[in-house]
Image: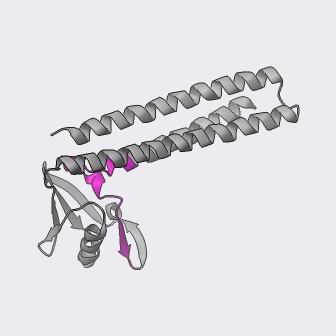
Amino acid sequence: MIKDLLKDAEHRMQGAIKNLSDDLAAIRTGRANPALVERLAISYYGSPTPLMQLASISVPEPRSLMIKPFDAGTLKEIEKAIQASDLGLTPNTDGKVIHLNLPPLTEERRRDLAKQVHARLEETRVAIRNIRRDSHNDMRDFEKEKLISEDDLKNGEEELQKLTDKFIEEVGELGRKKEAEIMEV
């Protein structure tokens, strides 16, 4: 019973780490990366659709992205969404493709991006702690209902804490890597 709870907690914590990885990939660094724009929501026939479903995204040069829509009719919508986003990029279009040139990051912009990274890291830590809290409450309920013994509860709490510590450390590691990537000139 406790093993099932721990497995569920681990699965949910891995989900939180996956979300963090996706969020961090969308934060701009000095190099062009398709992940910057691939999840950008584009209004396509009235419904928000990720850019990666509407266009191919390539990196022709280290500091530029090329977006080639599958349907030429979506070009204007893609352009609008890029301008409205917080990326701070201006799209250049030639009627068929959109070029995004990534200017070098200023020191101030690097610091702002590092703050964004720290905020996302903290959100993920809170999510992991909430998962721990929920699992811990479930264990206590099982013990109150006499489904598990007091010793099982103690062992389960220790395992849950080890699991939490492991994932919190993983969050810290992802954060350190991303911050180093941002600060790299």
Where's residue 178, x and y in %?
A: 31, 39
- Which residues are the magenta region? 23-45
At which x and y percent is residue 123? 48, 46
Q: Quadrant of residue 93?
A: bottom left
Q: Quadrant of residue 173?
A: top left
Q: Residue furthest front?
A: 108
Camera-side residue of 86 and 64: 86
Residue in view at x 83 percent, y 31 percent: 143
Relative to 167, 76 lies left or right: left
Q: Residue at image x 26%, y 53%?
A: 34
Q: Is residue 157 left or right of residue 118?
A: right
Q: Position of residue 135 (x, y in %)?
A: 68, 38
Q: For the C terminus, give its image quadrant.
A: top left
Residue 140 lies left or right of residue 116; in this view the side is right
Q: Position of residue 159 (x, y in %)?
A: 64, 24
Towards the viewer: 156 or 44: 156
Residue at the (65%, 32%) spot, across then down:
6
How many numbered marks appear?
0
Image vertical order of residue 127 relative to residue 97, above or below: above
